[in-house]
Amino acid sequence: MEFLAADTSQQRSLADIARMLQVDKATCHPMLIELTRRGWLVRHPHRKTYQLGPRLVPIGDAARGATNVVDIARPSLAGLADELGVACAALVTSSADLVVAELVQPRGVRRGTMGQQIGDRIQFRPPLAGIFLAWQDDRAVRNWLDQDVMGKPSKAVESHYREVLAAVRARGYGVECTLPGEEALGSHVEKELQDVRGGARESILESVYSKMMRPHMAIAELDPERQYMPFSINAPVFDDSAVAVLAVCAYDFRAPLSAAEVHTIGLTVRATARSVTHAIYGLEPPQKA
């Protein structure tokens, strides 16, 4: 899609596209047939060349709408980063992934981002992204649970995740923490990814996150007797259908926080997300048990 979109005045042959993808024509051809069948591509009847198809128009419109939300959120993210002194991000969902749509550093300094850059994709699965699921129906929650990195969750793990989602609904923000002994993980990930670009980045991110993502990193009720090391405190932005379309995230806290400190930061992140919801004329969903 990117290759064809780079110069829409040019129509590309099967050989051109296969060469760009670095796959053989026999592998590429069925992909092009299916994309053409679905209207994502159009094949010239005589030249046998390909160009972008009409089904991409509504997809592009949807992407433009998502970009508008990110544009509106950007000043609020910058204010949040300055207030908390950490990097803040806007994440959106795209099919089976979370996509880093924006990343803002506090003014005058640089803080950790768990190795992430704008455009990075992370698989949309537990324990991440509970704020996108907390207000959805049970079928959506079930699909999310089935994507757990550890495989189909046990009854105990599923019960924990459902407690997490209930807590997220009740307080309006999510908390995901590193486990004891992983306090320097953010620095390690950033070092690993420092000079890596493209698909290799996503492969490394996925590998690292697969190792670190465990059920109890998603926090349900905050324990006043416990210290926490959050790598993300996040809150949802809702559209006019009361659907979470963007996550406002404060990233990679490098010092332990008390439950009270986590809650104070969570309320600040929630207030920022709510301000963006109001700016896009979104609706917050009603509370549910």
Image: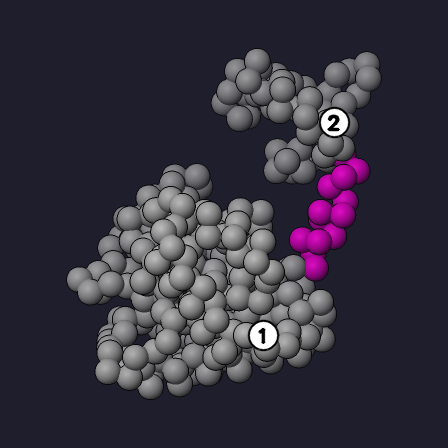
Secondary element type, mark 1: loop
Rendering quarter of residue 183: bottom left
Vertical placement of residue 114 versus 42, above or below: below
Image-quadrant location for residue 162 = bottom left
Residue 35 % position (x, y): 68, 29
**Secondary structure mostly taken by the magenta-highlighted segment of the chain:** helix
> Residue at the spot x=29%, y=48% of the render?
211
Please state which of residues 123 and 167 is positioned toward the viewer in this rendering: 167
Give residue 175's position: percent from left, percent from top.
Answer: 39, 70
Say which residue appears at 73% left-offset and 32% top-offset.
38
Q: Which mark is residue 288?
A: 1
Q: Is residue 54 magenta?
A: yes
Residue 31 in picture, x, y percent from top left = 62, 24
Name the residue at the front extreme.
Answer: 155
Mark 1 is surrounded, within 10 Å at the Cα level, by few (under 14), some (14 to 19) or many (20 or more) other residues, namely few
Q: Is residue 189 left or right of residue 143?
A: left
- Name the residue located 67 percent from the left edge and 69 percent from the top edge: 242
**Which residue range is magenta in the image?**
51-65
Number of the label disc, if any, that sits on residue 37: 2
